[in-house]
Image: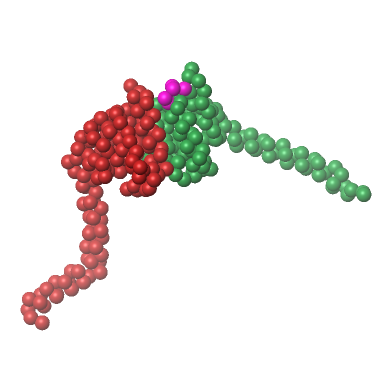
Amino acid sequence: MKMSGFYSYKRPIALGLSLILVSLQIQSANAGALCRGTIKEILTYDTGQVMIRPSWHSSWMQICSVETARDGVGVQTCWNWYAMASEAMSQGDNLLVYYASLDSAAGCADLPTYGASEAPRYLRREPAP
Amino acid sequence: MNKRAFEKHSLKKSLLGRPLFRRIVVISILLSVPILSGSAQNIVACQGKVSQALTYRDGRVMIYGSWRNDWTQICNVKTVWKDVSTEACWNWFALVNEAFSKGDDILVYYSNVPDGMTCETLPTYGSSLSPVYTRRMAAP
């Protein structure tokens, strides 16, 4: 079968170019960074919102809700995050929270708080420093 | 219509009968209702240690807080209690127990405490008030 001109050489080039463009866009839009520190306090509202007061920020950050999904974070995940944050608090361990909007950890102290808090990508626990 | 009835009628017609005046009266009454009812409810935050925690067969979760020295219900893990969901209740139970284990303070925040009532005199058992949030404090 004979291929037309477009299919023979233009299509792979176009595909390659678009892949490069898409990957560049993903890289620039989702740099992401980890905020690392201990958990000073933790609270839960009667409506299910779970908030933490971490060492990298002076205020309260909502991480999720145990009652309703919030920004793609399900209630099952929220239970897990609560348990992890609470255990880390009990043991004095570090909690690492990944935020997609950050370019570097320098922005951790200025993240939005309370209801405006960004939903983390993941939570990670590591041994006390 | 006698004179008295006529005066009453004309007064009603001259004041309340006017749409603008009537509207102002209605709006004033509506606005004063939440202000008046709100004045009887205060924000009270009770902080201290939990020396005991218990859960009844029907799901009621109670704590024995150092600020009250009696049993206070905070929620119910089986049914919605005074607007506190079962999900929040499970979480509060975990939070209270972890604070208990570590000897950390907890802070129970109320927004519906009647005038004159303090942490030491909060209603107990089934009459307990529903908290807005439960917070585990940093170890001193």
Predominant secondary structure, magenta span: helix
Image quarter (top left, top right, bottom left or bottom right) of the C terminus of chain B: top left
Residue B77 drawn at (x, y percent): 38, 43
Would residue A107 be found to the left or right of residue B21 on screen?
right
Name the outermost residue toward the top: A129
**Rendered view: B102 above or below B21:** above
Residue B11 drawn at (x, y percent): 14, 72
Q: Is residue B22 magenta?
A: no
Q: Which residue does the image show at 62% across and 34% down from the upper left? A: A28
Q: Is residue B124 visible?
A: yes
Q: Is residue A90 magenta?
A: yes
Q: Pick whichever, A14 or A56, lies toward us.
A: A56
Q: Which residue does the image show at 38% across and 48% down from the upper left? A: B79
* Count of numbered badges drawn on the protein: 0
Residue B132 drawn at (x, y percent): 33, 41
**Rendered view: B97 above or below A10:** above
Q: Which residue does the image show at 22% across and 59% down from the upper left? A: B29
Q: Is residue B111 visible?
A: no
Range of the magenta residues? A89-93
Q: Pick whichever, B29 or B80, lies toward us.
A: B80
Name the outermost residue toward the right: A1
Q: Answer with the quarter of the image where residue A57 lies.
A: top left
What colour do you see for chain B? Answer: red
The colour scheme applied to this rendered structure is by chain
Would residue B38 be found to the left or right of residue B100 on screen?
left
Instruction: Give the letter of the green chain.
Output: A
Q: Which residue does the image show at 72% across and 37% down from the upper left? A: A20
Name the outermost residue toward the left: B3
Residue B120 drawn at (x, y percent): 20, 35
